[in-house]
Amino acid sequence: MNMKKYINRAIESIIKKVSKQIPVIAVTGPRQSGKSTMLRHLFFDYDYITFDNLEIRMRAKKDPALFIESFENPVIIDEIQYVPEVLSYIKIDVDKYTTTMRHDEINGKFILTGSQIFTLMAGLTETLAGRIVLFELLPFSFEELGNKPHEVLGCYAQLLRGFYPGTNTLELDFKNFYGSYLTTYIERDVRQIQNIKDISQFQSFLKLLAGRVGSLLNLQEIAKEVGIVHSTVKSWLSILENSRIIYILRPYFRNISKRVVKSSKIYFTDTGLLSHLLGYQTPETLLSGPASGSVFENMIVIDVLKNKFNHKGKEDLYFYRDSNGIEVDLVIEENVDNFILIEIKASKSLQYESVKQLMKIPLNSNKRMVLSLIDKKLRLNKDVTQFPWWEYIK
C-alpha cells in the first residue's frame, strides 16, 4: 500500500498552542478521521498507547491508578472511551502539579482521543473541568486537501471518494474502504454502545437515512418503514450522532413565530459513506442520479461544519423553514444580530427563483447567497449573490 505525503490538518496550530497552556487535550471525531495520525505527527516524542488493544485495556481497567502513575513522559491515549475509569486518576495526577504551581511540567501531558463524541465529552468535562480543552476532527475539509475541483464531474468524483484519509492519502479503493468501514463500525462500535440484535435492520435504517439527507426527519415514518418502534429510532439516531456518522442540523426558531417547523434534518459527515449507502459507484451515475442534489448539499453543509471545528469557531449552524414553505438550506448565526443565509443548488442555471425565498427569511442578514455549480459569481439582485460553491468554501 502506497501512502502519499502527510496532509496537515487546519486544527494543528490551535492544538499545539493549547498544549502549552492546558494539562489535558482531547480530540474526538469519527473512526478513521485521522485523529491518531495527526496527534502522533504533532507530538512525535510522546509515548503512545491505544485502548483498542485489549490487553492494555484490561490492564488499565484492573488498576487505573497504577496505569496512569506509570507514565513519566507525556502520553497520547487513544480511544479513551473504552476505559473511562482512568479519567479520575488523570485528574489526580494533574492536580499534583497544579496545586504546587508547577504548571509548565504538566501542561500537555495527556493527549486523549475518542470516537464516541457526546458520551465522551460529558465524562471529560465533568471529571476534568478546568483542566481540559476539547477539539473535534472530522475527515478532510477542502481547505486541507487543497483541491476544490471546479469541473462538475471532478466535484462529484470527490463526493464519491469522500474525505476520509483512507481514500485520499492511502491507495485504497473507496468501494472496499466504505464496505469495510461499515462492517467495522457496526460490529465494533454499535454493538459496544447498544446490544442491537438484528444488524440487518440497523443496516436498513442507515440506508433509509441516506435516502433522506437534507429532508425533514419524520421519526414515525422511519420507524414504520424499518419495522421498529419510535423509541428505537431515537436511540439509533443518538448512536449515529454520538459517533459522528451523522450530523443533525436543527431548525432555527428562536424569537420566531410558532409557525416555524421544528423537525430536524440529517446529514452524513462523509459524502463517500453516504454515496456508498445509496449504491453509487461512479461520478457519472451520482451526478445523473436522483440523489445528486442532496449529496451536493451534504458536502456544503459538512464542509462549513468542518471549518467551524477546525478553527474553533463560535458560530451556530441551523436551517430555516416555516409552515408557509419559506425555507433556506443553511443559516449561520455569526452573532445574535447577524446571519449568513445560504441556499444550495446542484445546478449551473441562475437561481432567480431562490431570490424571493431568501428575501422572505425573517432574519437580519447582509449575506444572502446561493451556492451552486455555476462557473462565476453573479449578482442576482442588490441583496443576493450566486457563487460557485468552490469560491465560498475555504
Image (cartoon, helix red, strand yellow):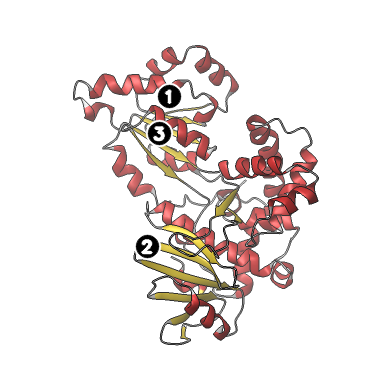
Q: Amino acid at mark 2?
A: Glu
Q: Quadrant of residue 44?
A: top left
CA–CA distance in space, label 1 to label 3? 10 Å
**Front residue (pair 223, 80):** 223
N-terminal-most mark, 1 or 3: 1
Residue at horizontal 33%, vertical 29%?
Answer: 109
**Is residue 21 visible in the rendered structure shown here?**
yes
Which residue, given by chain and number where applicable, does mark 3 sit on?
125
Q: Find numbered disc 1 in the image and state the secondary structure of the residue it sits on.
A: helix
Q: Amino acid at mark 3?
A: Thr
CA–CA distance in space, label 1 to label 2? 34 Å
Q: From the top left corner, tell me how far across and down residue 365 is, in percent.
A: 39, 73
Q: Is residue 202 left or right of residue 379?
A: right
N-terminal-most mark, 1 or 2: 1
The N terminus, quarter of image: top right
Q: Find numbered disc 2 in the image and state the secondary structure of the residue it sits on.
A: strand
* Front: mark 1 or 3: 3
CA–CA distance in space, label 3 to label 2? 25 Å
Which residue, given by chain and number where applicable, does mark 1 sit on?
87
Is residue 363 depicted above or below 53 in this figure?
Answer: below
